Image (cartoon, rainbow, N blue to C red):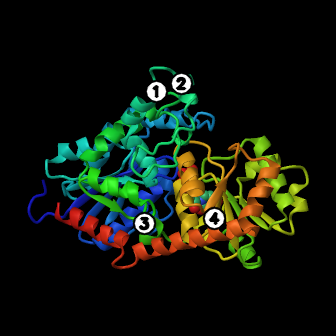
Amino acid sequence: NRVKGQQPHVAVLAFPFGTHAAPLHNLACGLASAAPHVAFSFVNSAKSNATLAAVDSAPPNLKFYDVDDGAPADFAFDPRSPEEEIDNFMRVTPGNFRKGMEDAVRRTGGATISCVISDCFLWFAGDLAAELGAAVPWVGLWTGGSRSLSVHLYTDLLRETVSAGEKGASDVESKVDDELGFLPGMAGMRLCDLPEGVVSGNLNSVFARLLHRMGLELPRASALAINTFEGLDPAVLIDFHAKFKRCLPLGPLNLLCPPPSRPDSTGCLEWLDRQAHGEAVYIGFGTLMTPPSAELAELAEGLEASGAPFLWSLKKKFWPLLPAGFLARTADRGLVATWTPQARVLEHPAVGVFVTHCGWNSVLESLVGGVPMVCRPFLGDQHINSRSISHTWKIGVAFPEKTMTKDEVAKALHVVLRTAEGKKMKERACALRAVALQQVQPGGSSSENLRALVAIISTS
Ligand code: UDP
C-alpha cells in the first residue's frame, strides 16, 4: 500500500467507552516512542480523547483525531442505560472512523495508512484495513483478560452446548453451575460467570451482537495484541497461539508502556504512608460502577466492623448514601476520596487487600501490587475475572451471594488480612507479580512481543 520511501502511518482506532481507550493510548504512546520514524494517528471520540491524561505529553509522532460519537445534540448520559451511548456510537461506525482516517492522511501530508491497530470491539477494522490495501495489516488489541476473550471466540459453541435461544432462559438457569471445562483453560469457570448476552439475557442487543461478530472476525487479524502476560493463563494462551496468526501478550500494559504518573490530588499516598504495612483496605469499583445504595451501606458497616484502616475511592455524589455518622466515626482510620491514583495505591506497601468490581485494569494493577482481592463483580467480564481470582489463581475471595452484606464484608476482610489462608493468597499474588515484572523486562515475553509489533508496523 505504502509508496516506497513514504513514512509508515499507523491508524489507532479506539472504542471510546469505559476504560477502553486508556490501555490503547498507553500502547500507542509506547509504540510511538519505540518507532519515532512512524506516524501514529489516534482516532477516537472527542469526549474520550479529552479524558486521556497524557494527550499533551504524547510523543510528537502521535496525533489525535476526533470522530463523531453519534450522540444527538440533546443527549444526556443515563447511568441506568449505559448501552445507549454505545448504540449511538455503533450506528455511525465505521463511517466516522473512515472519515477520521482520511482526515489523518490529509493532515499527515498525504502519508497513506500502512497499518490499522484497533480495539478488538471494532470488529469491522479488518475490513477498513483491507479497503486501504491488501497488504495493510489489522492488529486488534483486547484490553481485557484472556478468559474473557475466549468466551467470545467460542460463543457459538457455548450456545450450542446449552441450547441457548432454543429452550429459553429458564433452561440456561438450570445449568448456571455447569462448568466450562470443555473450552481450553476454562476449567472451573461456570455458565453463571459468562457475561450477559453470551448464553443468557438479550442475545440480540447491540452489544451482544457486537461481541459475537467480533469473535467471528478476530481470527482474521494479522495479530492479536492482548493486555495479559505469559504465565497467567497458560492453557488459554496456548489456544490463542494456535487460533491467531500472531498472538502478542503485552501485559501488564501499564508496566510495559507506563502512562505518566497521576498526581496524588487527594493526599491518598501520604495517608497510606502513615498506615502499618499490609493492613489497609483499598476499595474502588472503577470508573462506571457504584454498588446500589443498600449495598453501599452494608459495605460501610462491614468496614467499620472489621476495624481495619481503609481508603475508599467514591465519587462525592455518593457520600450522602453512607450510613449516618460513618465518616465522622471512622475519620481516625479511614479516608474516603473522590479519586485515587489507583495503580500507585495498589503498589503501596500499606495496602493489604483490594475490594474491587474486578474490571480488568483494576485486576492487573492489583496483581502488579501483589495485593489479594475481595471481589464484587457487577457485569460483563467482571464475573469471569472474579472467578479467576477466587478459584483459579486463588488470590482472593468472592461473596457467596455475589452481593455485599455487613457480615460477609467483615468476614472476607478477616480471611484475607488475618488468616493463614489470606497469607497464602498474598504469597500467590506476589508470585504472579514476579512473573508480570519478569515479562516486561528486556528479554521478557511482553517486551519481546512489543518489539515484534514494532517490526509489524515498521515494515508494513
Ligand atoms: N481509577 C483510578 N482511580 C480511581 C478509580 C479508578 O486511577 O479512583 C482507574 C484504575 O486505576 C483503573 C481504571 O480507573 O485503571 C478502571 O479500570 P477498570 O478496567 O478496572 O474498570 P472500568 O472503569 O473499566 O469499569
Q: Quadrant of residue 403?
A: top right
- Please report whichever mark, 3 or 4, sits nearer to the chain's N-terminal start: 3
The residue depicted at 22 percent of the width and 47 percent of the height is 129
376 displayed left or right of 217: right
Whether the residues at callouts 1 and 2 have beta carbons within 8 Å, the answer is yes
Whether the residues at callouts 3 and 4 have beta carbons within 8 Å, the answer is no
CA–CA distance in space, label 1 to label 2: 8 Å
The quadrant of the picture showing ligand 1 is bottom right
- Please report whichever mark, 3 or 2, sits nearer to the chain's N-terminal start: 2
Q: Quadrant of residue 271?
A: bottom right
Q: Which residue is mark 1?
A: 164
Q: Amino acid at mark 4?
A: Pro
CA–CA distance in space, label 1 to label 4: 35 Å
CA–CA distance in space, label 3 to label 2: 36 Å
- Please report whichever mark, 2 or 4, sits nearer to the chain's N-terminal start: 2
User: Mark on residue 372?
Assistant: 4
Whether the residues at callouts 2 and 4 have beta carbons within 8 Å, the answer is no
- Cβ at disc 4 under 8 Å from ligand 1: no
Q: Residues within 10 Å of mark 3 (few under 14, many from 20)?
A: few
Image quarter hosting the C terminus: bottom left
- The location of residue 111, given as percent across then percent down, is 19, 58
Q: Which residue is mark 3?
A: 231
Q: Amino acid at mark 2?
A: Asp
CA–CA distance in space, label 2 to label 4: 35 Å
Q: Which residue is mark 2?
A: 171
The residue depicted at 24 percent of the width and 66 percent of the height is 38
- The location of residue 137, given as percent across then percent down, is 21, 53
